[in-house]
């Protein structure tokens, strides 16, 4: 099958070359490829960047494949040059065929903030993307070496300058019965009251007078509550009905879950989290939080956010991964 295809391709190339030699100039018109941007949209955002999706469809009129490295893209926001991306979304199109390729390019907000004046006063940002595509053509008589395409795309993006904090962090120990049940399951003869006292000492940042049992050796639920404050120091509004979260404390994962308890206040979203973690999670790093009453956090979040139609008519996925420090309530 491959040998037959190669023979047909060779015959077509020879025929084109012969025609170019015997026909007068201008009598033979060579077909040209087409390259169309069939999709262009904002596909996702985070608190630190925005991702654009491009779909490029190329039609190849020649009997041989066309391969190219991709598009060169120049991004301007509010008229200021932000960055360029080279050779994005390259692929190969089979002979006499049509093929589409989808690729993403991410624009970092840090780069935008550096060049846009009065950034914090803006809600939507005018973004222009100028693109060029150069496709090398088959080496045939009368056919140019390359064929070029130019594009100019426009889209608005939200102005985001985030500030994420963890507030009102507090814990509540399990009940005596919960501790007793955990000890029975473990097959331990330790007194439930003394074991609970040891756990309470850890949560209060105290060292127990005597080593009764390591709370991490039990599996009892510790209640935790805190508020995630998500503020935007620019003017774009980020609102969502629910937030998936993962909280890491001093490098160790503590709780994951989803909260629908969200309120808007003074330009920020306040997400209330009420959850539990196992006493087995009381690692050395987590215990340091309770002994010093403060610690470092890393907070990962996911949500679906509806932005103005100029950005997207459909809700967009929002993801973030923020870090900082916090104190206990």
Image (spheres, rainbow, N blue to C red):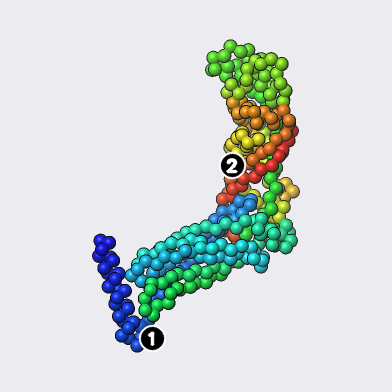
Residue on which the image places disc 1: 26
**Front in this rendered view, residue 44 or 99:** 99
Does residue 285 sit above or below 5 in this rendering? above
Q: Residue 229 or 249: which is nearer the viewer?
A: 249
Q: Secondary structure at mark 1?
A: loop
Image quadrant occupied by the N terminus: bottom left
Left or right relative to 123: residue 30: left
In the image, is 165 to the left or to the right of 25?
Answer: right
Q: Which quadrant of the figure contains the C terminus?
A: top right
Circles 2 and 1, Cβ within 8 Å, touching? The answer is no
With 197 as the anchor, is 84 left or right in this view? left
The answer, for residue 156, to whether it is visible in the render is no
Callout 2: few (<14), some (14-19), or many (20+) C-alpha neighbours within 10 Å?
A: some
Spot occupied by residue 276 in the image (x, y as percentages of width and height): 61, 30
Q: Quadrant of residue 203?
A: top right
Chain-order first, disc 2 or disc 1: 1
Residue 82 against residue 323 in the figure, above or below: below
The residue indicated by pointer 2 is: 244
Residue sitting at x 51%, y 61%: 88
Image position, residue 182 (x, y; %): 57, 19
SS class, disc 2: strand
Callout in the foreground (2, 1): 1
The alpha-carbon separation of the residues under discs 2 and 1 comes to: 64 Å
- Up the image or down, 131 lies above or below 21; here it is above
Q: Position of residue 258 (x, y in %)?
A: 59, 39
Residue at position x 71%, y 39% in the image = 325
Q: Quadrant of residue 212?
A: top right
């Amino acid at each position: 099958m491959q040998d037959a295809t190669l023979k047909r391709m060779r015959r077509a190339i020879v025929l084109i070359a012969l025609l170019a030699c015997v026909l007068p100039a201008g009598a033979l018109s060579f077909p040209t490829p087409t390259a169309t941007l069939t999709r262009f949209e904002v596909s996702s955002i985070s608190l630190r960047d925005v991702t654009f999706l491009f779909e490029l469809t190329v039609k190849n009129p020649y009997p041989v494949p066309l391969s190219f490295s991709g598009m060169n893209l120049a991004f301007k926001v509010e008229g200021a040059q932000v960055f360029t991306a080279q050779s994005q979304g390259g692929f190969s199109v089979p002979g006499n065929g049509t093929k589409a390729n989808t690729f993403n390019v991410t624009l970092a907000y840090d780069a935008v903030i550096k060049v846009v004046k009065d950034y914090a006063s803006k809600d939507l940002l005018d973004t222009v993307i100028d693109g060029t595509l150069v496709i090398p053509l088959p080496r045939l008589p009368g056919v140019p070496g390359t064929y070029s395409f130019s594009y100019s795309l426009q889209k608005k993006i939200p102005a985001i300058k985030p500030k994420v904090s963890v507030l009102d962090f507090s814990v509540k120990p399990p009940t005596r019965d919960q501790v007793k049940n955990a000890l029975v399951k473990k097959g331990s003869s330790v007194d439930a009251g003394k074991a609970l006292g040891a756990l309470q000492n850890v949560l209060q940042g105290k060292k127990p007078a005597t080593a009764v049992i390591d709370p991490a050796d039990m599996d009892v639920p510790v209640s935790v509550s805190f508020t995630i404050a998500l503020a935007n120091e620019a003017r774009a509004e980020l609102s969502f009905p629910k937030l998936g979260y993962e909280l890491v404390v001093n490098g160790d994962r503590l709780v994951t879950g989803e909260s629908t308890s969200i309120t808007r206040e003074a330009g920020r979203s306040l997400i209330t989290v009420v959850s539990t973690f196992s006493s087995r999670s009381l690692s050395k790093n987590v215990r340091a939080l309770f002994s010093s009453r403060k610690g470092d956090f890393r907070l990962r979040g996911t949500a679906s956010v509806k932005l103005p139609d100029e950005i997207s008519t459909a809700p967009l996925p929002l993801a973030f991964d923020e870090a900082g420090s916090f104190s206990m309530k």
